Amino acid sequence: MHLRRLNNIIHRDLGYLVAGTTILYAVSGLALNHVDDWNPNFVIERQDVRAPTPKGPGAVSRQWVLGVLEPLGQEAHYRSHDFPTPKKLKIYLDDGSVFLDLESGEGVYESVRRRPILYQANCLHISPKRAWLVFSDVYAVALIVVSLTGLFVLKGSKGITGRGAVLATAGVVVPLFFMFSIG
C-alpha cells in the first residue's frame, strides 16, 4: 500500500475515533475558561426567604427550622443547621442551603444542582481515576498521531511544503507567544 494512502487512512479513521472526545474536551474547556463569568458545573438559584424571628439562638429548634423550610417545600431535604455567628443561621439541605439573619428574619435560599452533561464533561479535565488517566494518555497520543498524519494529507502548494508549513508554524508560534508573554 502506498505510504500516502496509509497516512490518509490512519488520519481519517483515528480522526473519527477521537472526534467525540475532542468535542467534549473543547466544550468543557470553553466553559472552564470562563469560570469567573458563570459556574460551569452547577446551577445556583437564589430565592429570598422571610422567617419569624426567634427569641434567641436557644429558641431555634429542629421544629422551628422545619417551619422555615415548609414554604420552600424543603422540609424533606433538611440535613442540619448551625450558627456561623450568633445572629446568623445556616440550614443545610440536600440540594442547597438557607442563610438567615436571626434579628431581621430575612434570608436567602440557594438551591444547587449539577449542570447536566457539562458537569460530567468538566470532570474529564480533573478526574484522578486511574482508568481515566490511561484513557486520556491514549487519547493524547491519538491526537498527536492525527495531527502528524494531517500534515501529510495534502500535496503541493496547499500541503506541508506550501501553505501548510506556514499554518503549522503559526500553530506552534502563536501559542508559544502567549505562553511566554503571560508567564
Image (cartoon, rainbow, N blue to C red):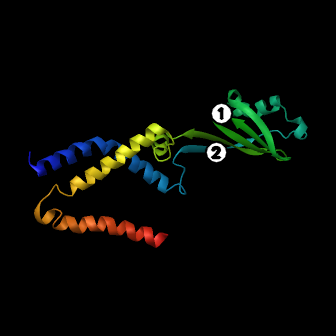
Rendering coords of residue 182 (x, y %):
48, 70
Residue 67 quadrant: top right
Look at mark 1 in the image and give the residue it sits on. Answer: 94
Look at mark 2 in the image and give the residue it sits on. Answer: 46
Q: Is residue 103 left or right of residue 39?
A: right
Question: Mark 1 or 2, which is nearer the eye?
Answer: 1
Hey, what amino acid is under mark 2? Arg
Q: Nearer the viewer, residue 132 or 92?
A: 132
Separation of marks 1 and 2 at Cα, in angstroms: 15 Å
Q: Is residue 116 visible?
A: no
- Tag 2: Cα neighbours inside 10 Å, few (<14), some, or many (≥20)? few
Query: Residue farthest to the left?
Result: 2
Decide which of tag 1 and tag 2 comes sooner along the chain: 2
- Tag 1: Cα neighbours inside 10 Å, few (<14), some, or many (≥20)? some
Image quarter (top left, top right, bottom left or bottom right) of the N terminus: top left
Hey, what amino acid is under mark 1? Asp
Image point 16% across, 66% down: which residue? 161
Secondary-structure class at tag 2: strand
Q: Is residue 83 left or right of residue 118?
A: right
Image point 33% across, 48% down: which residue? 141
Q: Is residue 124 visible?
A: yes
Image point 16% across, 67% down: which residue? 162
Q: Nearer the viewer, residue 31 or 89?
A: 31
The correct choice, above or below, for 76 with respect to 13 in the image is: above
Rendering coords of residue 64 (x, y %):
82, 32
Q: Is residue 149 left or right of residue 173?
A: left
Rendering coords of residue 46 (x, y %):
64, 45
